[in-house]
Image: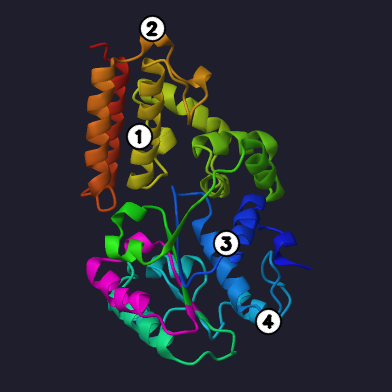
Amino acid sequence: MAEADAPGVAPWIARQRGQLLAQRGHAWLLHGPSGLGQYALALELARAWLCDAPTGQGACGACASCHGVEVRTHADLCVLMPEVQMLALGWPLSEKAQSDIDEKKRKASREIRVDAMREAVEFAQRTSARGRGKVVLVYPAEQMNAVTANALLKTLEEPPGDVRFVLASEAAHRLLPTIRSRCLAHTLHWPPAAEALAWLQAQGVPGPAAQVWLRAAGGRPDDALALARAGRDPQAWGRIPQALSRGDGAALADLAPPQVVDVLQKLCHDLLALRVGGAPRYFAGADLPQPGALPSVDVLTRWSALLRQEARTAEHPFNAGLMLEALVAQARETLHSRH
């Protein structure tokens, strides 16, 4: 059975996989907003390129190569991610990196380390272990700093004959122009809402919750699934605007600071949309203030700018509790302002 029929592979990912496999190229850049399946599509391409019996629609899902990818041990696949994501997704770190983290010499990195990239470049020069070429998968590619990206650049310019690269990014504008120019670009497709809802339900998310989380994720199915699996109450999502109007931040108390800022930015977006006659994207209209009770465009624009500033330091707040209090107070003041 072709991998296109395997459970868990979203239909819109399967369609794009077939389109890309029909094209030639040694380096692909898959890009678009978060939550559209960049990593899933990149892994599907790698799986198909390495498969012993691939079809035009993808990997067979049954050969030794497919099993090696599934259990994260394929000798001809090199995965480059920030170490925190490698660990979260079950990819093994190098012995030295794992030892340093286990011995608390340092924390797992949040960017793609240059030494890991150098190991990947060396990997690309070696002979294929299974005779079907090699693949280097980089995700999220924007987590390469300039030094790391430059370490990759020469290999992209003069690739060995049997290696392919797939870079997956949720912020391709942050990549070096020289990296972008050496890849074939593919923009991830937005799936139809009905298809995304059906897929979420197939992943075990009940229908009403799937609708809430897909809206909260702005229509991005991977992000919606992550929200659903976080164990939060979907009904609580719609109560956030009214709670913030009262100065009650309890619904946000269990979120990390970057997540709090993200929720507030979504609320600000929807209020601005309503103010200029548009439709909300993240919250149901019934959960938001009525048109006559909306803050002005100037007030909302100032709040948006403040939230962008907060987002820059949210990963490392001085005091997460104080930051939440300040953000909730700021939201309450904004929601009650009429100037």
On residue 265, the disc is: 1
Give, as a three-letter code, the residue at label 4.
Asp
Residue at 59% across / 85% down in the picture? 132
Give, as a three-letter code, the residue at label 2.
Gly
Looking at the picture, tell me which residue is in the foreground, 337 or 269. Answer: 269
User: Residue 221's x, y, as percent?
Assistant: 56, 45
- Nearer the observer, disc 4 or disc 3? 3
Judged left or right of residue 306, residue 47 is right
User: Residue 277's x, y, as percent?
Assistant: 41, 15
Tell me the distance, in whole angstroms, between the alpha carbons under discs 2 and 4: 63 Å
- Quarter occupied by residue 206: top right
How crowded pointer 4 is (Cα within 10 Å; few <14, some 14-19, many 20+) is rated as some
Q: Could you tell me if residue 333 is visible in this image? A: no
Residue at 71% across / 49% down in the picture? 202
Give, as a single range, the part of the protein colored magenta: 135-163
Looking at the picture, tell me which residue is in the foreground, 87 or 78. Answer: 78
Q: Earlier in the sequence, mark 3 or mark 2?
A: 3
- Nearer the observer, disc 1 or disc 3? 3
- Nearer the observer, disc 3 or disc 2? 3
Q: Are marks 4 and 1 in contact (CB under 8 Å)?
A: no
- Where is mark 4, residue-wise? 52
Q: Secondary structure at mark 4?
A: loop
Give, as a three-letter code, the residue at label 1.
Gln
- Where is mark 3, residue-wise? 20
Looking at the picture, tell me which residue is in the foreground, 312 or 2. Answer: 2
Judged left or right of residue 58, residue 215 is left
- Which quadrant of the rendered structure holds the C terminus? top left
